[in-house]
Image (spheres, grey):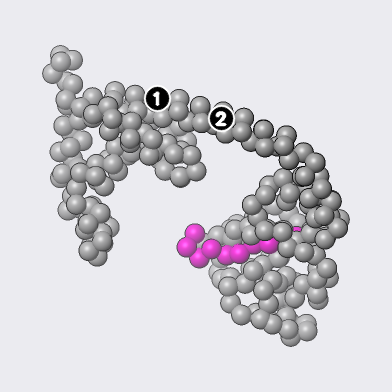
Amino acid sequence: MVHEPPVVPEPRTVPRATLPSRTGLLVFQPLKRRHCAECRRGPLPLLVLEDGVPRCLDCADLGHLVFLPSGDTALTRRSREESVLSAVVVRFNRRKSRYERQGVLVEEAALARAEQRCLADAEARRRRRVRDARRRSAQDARFTQAFAAEIRRLFPGCPADRARAIAAHAAERGSGRVGRSAAGRALTEGAVTSAVVASVRHLDTPYDRLLMSGVPRHEARRRIAAVVETVVRGWTEAGLGSAG
């Protein structure tokens, strides 16, 4: 079995933990111009690292494989099932400092068989996707409602429509926002407060304009901190009088 290469090409200082954890062959889409250490061909659109040096797919005995881009989960899975030899293609994302999957290399005949399998049950998979989408939509609606209710409990002065808008924004699936974090899903006070503060910062202060004018983020936050505190305190204390 061929293991993941111990050295990565882009950049060389990136820790190995940023590579996909899955074992198997890895092929890289280089960010810089690379040439094959064996045949000198290049620049290479795809390369394999062997003993820390780049080799083209032909020299690495992978030249007969075809590239299947990411996007169709069923086709990718079935292509790898059908292919005796396959490899995962990755590319380094400088902004996120990690490698990301771009697709797979599989045998051409395996890809054809996988496509036939996908065509055969396309309608069944479509219906399943519709059911799954409905289920997720219902789950999201319940969670957003619970998040908004928790905002109103912690900040009784927050208008109901504003609480719903904050909850919907924070809990958007796939957004990576605080509502989708473990703390957000648990409706912890810290997560709910963070969502409220973020909303006030962007909608009730000149914070965004400060950023656009070139003010550093930490300085912009310092300038609007008093306004945020005033709004949040007002929403917090709004129901204290009637509670007493």
Q: What label sits on residue 186 in the rendered view?
A: none
Residue found 49% across the figure and 59% down from its top: 96
Q: Quadrant of the N terminus?
A: bottom right
- What secondary structure is the stretch in magenta mostly built from? strand
Q: Amino acid at mark 1?
A: Ala
Q: What label sits on residue 134 in the rendered view?
A: 2
Residue 230: x, y in percent?
Answer: 15, 38
Residue found 66% across the figure and 81% down from its top: 43
Tell me the magenta residue range: 87-96
Q: Amino acid at mark 2?
A: Arg
Q: Secondary structure at mark 2?
A: helix
18 sits left or right of 204 in the view: right
Residue 206 or 228: which is nearer the viewer? 206
Q: For mark 1, what is the residue?
A: 146
Residue 65: x, y in percent?
Answer: 80, 65
Residue 145: x, y in percent?
Answer: 39, 26
Magenta highlight on residue 90: yes
Vertical order, 7 against 197 (above or below): below
